[in-house]
């Protein structure tokens, strides 16, 4: 038997593990807004089976027309509702009567011509994103001038690391030479405690990835402890001590900021022919692409959780695998139901 929507919302609040208190507050606010919407249209006590596939569109329209919420708030709360639908669909059979594909199709057909139409980041992520960005950045020719050369090598190192580790950009910018040295002696394995959640992300730096890093570090020839650094207008500070660079905020050798890294990724995305208004092209897109690639390769959710540093496999499932892997199921069922082979064995 399916629960009422308020009961289902309470199940979501009680069972989903959030990365931090701020995220929890935002999700709870979004779900409270959804409850207010259902109250206003006198549907708050309906069962989850009565939720219609265009509920996301209707909720978004109510926030815009009846409450006058700002666009960022509407986008956030719509994402929260979609996350709740994914959670209920993935964990409680029969609660939601429509598929994710039907929900997405309802959104697209209801918002034709609407400039505020918003699709999920998963939908806007180019299928070949990680490989496309890699090919583009590695084809950039190396200039002769030292600082110009460092700019290109840094672009390559940033993209290669984002693609290889699936780390959040804030954590990636914290990577030090010591981290890389530790990975070298552990067959490329890198365990990094993430700043946002305190969880351990289990990454792997392959041989080719290490070669790209080494080329950048060799060209720099400095004592900065960071892998990704600011270049400033000259490299005259490269002979300063590691302790100097560790505390430096600006100038050559200081740690690259997340904002600067975001700009570099957008530059490479533009060179790749990707429009950031239409495509998901931020540094975080590498994290989504990496997880998607692992899922499609048959890696278990438990192992993907370890790579991404999620608190539980349930978190990984909600974000990256809300629907069953139909392709894998088809392959198994075709093998299972291959009666011909069994007859021939007789």
Image: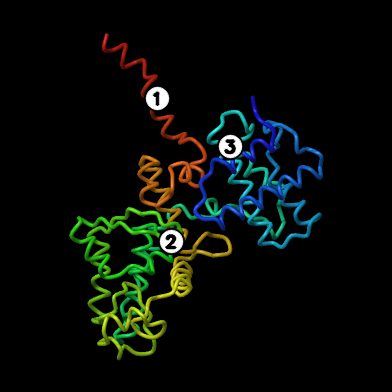
- Identify the residue shown where x is 22% and y is 66%: 181
> Sequence-wise, which precedes: disc 3 or disc 2?
3
Compared with 78, 156 (above or below) is below
Distance Cα–Cα, label 3 vs label 2: 27 Å
Secondary element under disc 1, as helix, strand or loop, is: helix
Front residue of 113 and 6: 6
Q: Nearer the viewer, residue 191 or 275?
A: 191
Quadrant for the C terminus in the image: top left
Residue located at (29% from left, 81% from top): 243
Label 3: element kind: helix
Please give the residue where the numbered disc 1 appears in the rendered image.
334
Name the colour scheme.
Answer: rainbow
Name the residue carrying label 2.
Answer: 168
Q: Residues within 10 Å of mark 1 (few under 14, many from 20)?
A: few
Q: Position of residue 304 (x, y in %)?
A: 38, 46
- Counting residues from the N terminus, which is met first, the one under dot 2 or under dot 1? 2
What is the distance, in whole Å, between disc 2 and disc 1 at their CAs?
39 Å
Can you tell which mark lies on residue 88? 3
Mark whose residue sits in front, 2 or 1? 2
Is there CB contact under 8 Å for labels 3 and 2?
no
Disc 2 on helix, strand or loop?
A: loop
- Sequence-wise, the earlier of marks 1 and 3 is 3
Q: Residue at x 45, y 36 (%)?
A: 325
Q: Nearer the viewer, mark 1 or mark 3?
A: 3
Residue 75 percent across, percent down from the top left: 65, 57
Q: As drawn, is 170 to the left or to the right of 149?
A: right
**Residue 74, placed above or below residue 42:** below
Q: How many marks?
A: 3
Residue 150 spot, x, y in % from top left = 32, 80
The residue depicted at 30 percent of the width and 89 percent of the height is 237
How far, Cα to Cα, is label 1 from label 3? 29 Å
């Amino acid at each position: 038997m399916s629960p009422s929507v308020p009961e289902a919302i309470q199940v979501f609040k009680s069972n989903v593990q959030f990365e931090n208190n701020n995220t929890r507050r935002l999700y709870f606010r979004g779900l409270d807004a959804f409850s207010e919407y259902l109250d206003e249209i006198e549907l708050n006590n309906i069962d989850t089976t009565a939720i219609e596939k265009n509920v996301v569109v209707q909720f978004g329209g109510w926030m815009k027309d009846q409450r006058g919420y700002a666009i960022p708030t509407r986008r956030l709360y719509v994402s929260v509702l979609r996350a709740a639908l994914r959670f209920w669909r993935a964990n409680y059979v029969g609660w939601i009567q429509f598929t994710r594909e039907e929900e997405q199709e309802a959104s697209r057909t209801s918002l034709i011509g609407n400039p505020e139409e918003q699709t999920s980041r998963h939908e806007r992520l180019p299928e070949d994103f990680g490989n496309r960005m890699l090919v583009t950045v590695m084809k950039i020719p190396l200039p002769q001038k030292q600082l110009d050369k460092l700019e290109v090598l840094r672009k390559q190192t940033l993209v290669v690391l984002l693609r290889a580790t699936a780390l959040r950009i804030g954590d990636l910018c914290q990577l030090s030479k010591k981290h890389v040295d530790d990975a070298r002696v552990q067959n490329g394995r890198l365990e990094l405690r993430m700043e946002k959640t305190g969880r351990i992300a289990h990454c792997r730096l392959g041989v080719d990835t290490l070669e790209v890093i080494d080329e950048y570090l060799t060209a720099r020839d400095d004592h900065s402890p960071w892998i990704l650094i600011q270049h400033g207008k000259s490299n005259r500070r490269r002979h300063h001590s590691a302790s100097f660079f560790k505390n430096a905020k600006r100038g050559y050798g200081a740690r690259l900021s997340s904002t600067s890294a975001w700009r570099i990724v957008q530059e490479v995305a533009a060179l790749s022919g990707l429009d950031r208004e239409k495509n998901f092209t931020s540094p975080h897109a590498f994290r989504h692409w990496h997880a998607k690639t692992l899922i499609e390769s048959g890696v278990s959710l438990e192992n993907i959780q370890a790579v991404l540093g999620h608190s539980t496999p349930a978190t990984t499932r909600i974000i990256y695998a809300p629907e069953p892997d139909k392709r894998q199921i088809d392959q198994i069922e075709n093998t299972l139901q291959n009666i011909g082979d069994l007859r021939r064995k007789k």
